[in-house]
Image: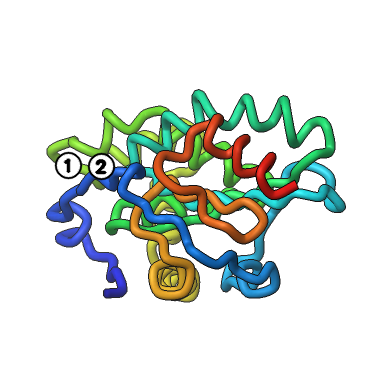
């Protein structure tokens, strides 16, 4: 069901844990063209012609995604992205209204600063996810990375982006088999179980 933003929706939404270990593996890998056909174009880290394509879906309210950011991504970057062995894109997956707000607020920062804005929100999850006034707490976090309250309110009016986020969520669930985050694809195949460095590395090795 698409998410619609309102102060009531933002304050009332619950944050359900999406346990990555419950994710199934797709029996048949997706064609790369199908996986890359999304409403919000990917921005890849790594060499454009790298033989391995890694795509991760993440959510700002997902605790496992923060663990991935802290523990898994640095190792992938060092071993695969920086060495030209793989390229990687990170995609938005909206689980609730708060996720949508973070992605929409990051958008107003521009393409170069957006990842840092999202990362700042994720590293400060505890300050806003469970805050009594989530909207006020999110505005405070955004302000720390240069997103003023005026820009914050303007970002929440971006219905075009909200529509794209909802369509990408629907596509991820219905076409790509995603049930939670983080969800990682390696050359079109969803990594089974928890998206750990070892699991991703094993899938890369198995596909070569």
Residue beneath the point at 46% across and 50% down: 183
Local crowd size for mark 2, using a 10 Å CA cut-off: few (<14), some (14–19), many (≥20): some
Residue on which the image places disc 1: 133
Is there a contact, CB below 8 Å, between mark 2 and mark 1? yes
Q: Nearer the viewer, residue 84 or 7?
A: 84
Residue beneath the point at 58% across and 46% down: 114
Q: How many marks?
A: 2
Q: Nearer the viewer, residue 157 or 26?
A: 26
Residue 152: image x %, image y %? 41, 52
Residue beneath the point at 20% across and 48% down: 16
Image quadrant assignment for residue 32: bottom right
Q: Nearer the viewer, residue 36 or 131?
A: 36
Q: CA distance from mark 2 to mark 1?
A: 6 Å
102 sits left or right of 81 in the view: left
Please, what secondary structure does the residue beneath circle 2 have?
helix
Residue on which the image places disc 2: 136
56 sits left or right of 79 in the view: left
């Amino acid at each position: 069901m698409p998410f619609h933003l309102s102060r009531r929706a933002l304050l009332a939404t619950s944050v359900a844990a999406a346990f990555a270990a419950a994710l199934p593996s797709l029996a048949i890998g997706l064609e790369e063209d199908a996986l890359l056909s999304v409403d919000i174009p990917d921005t890849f880290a790594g060499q454009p012609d790298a033989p391995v394509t890694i795509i991760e879906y993440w959510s700002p309210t997902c605790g496992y995604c923060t663990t991935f950011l802290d523990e898994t991504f640095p190792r992938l970057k060092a071993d695969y992205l920086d060495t030209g062995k793989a390229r990687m894109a990170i995609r938005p997956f909206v689980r609730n209204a708060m996720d949508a707000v973070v992605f929409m607020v990051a958008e107003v920062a521009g393409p170069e600063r957006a990842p840092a804005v999202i990362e700042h929100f994720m590293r400060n999850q505890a300050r806003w996810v469970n805050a009594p006034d989530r909207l006020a707490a999110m505005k405070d976090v955004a302000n720390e990375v240069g997103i003023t309250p005026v820009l914050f309110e303007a970002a929440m009016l971006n219905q075009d982006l909200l529509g794209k986020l909802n369509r990408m969520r629907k596509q991820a669930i219905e076409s790509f088999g995603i049930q939670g985050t983080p969800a990682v694809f390696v050359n079109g195949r969803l990594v089974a179980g928890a998206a750990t460095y070892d699991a991703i590395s094993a899938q890369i090795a198995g596909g070569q």
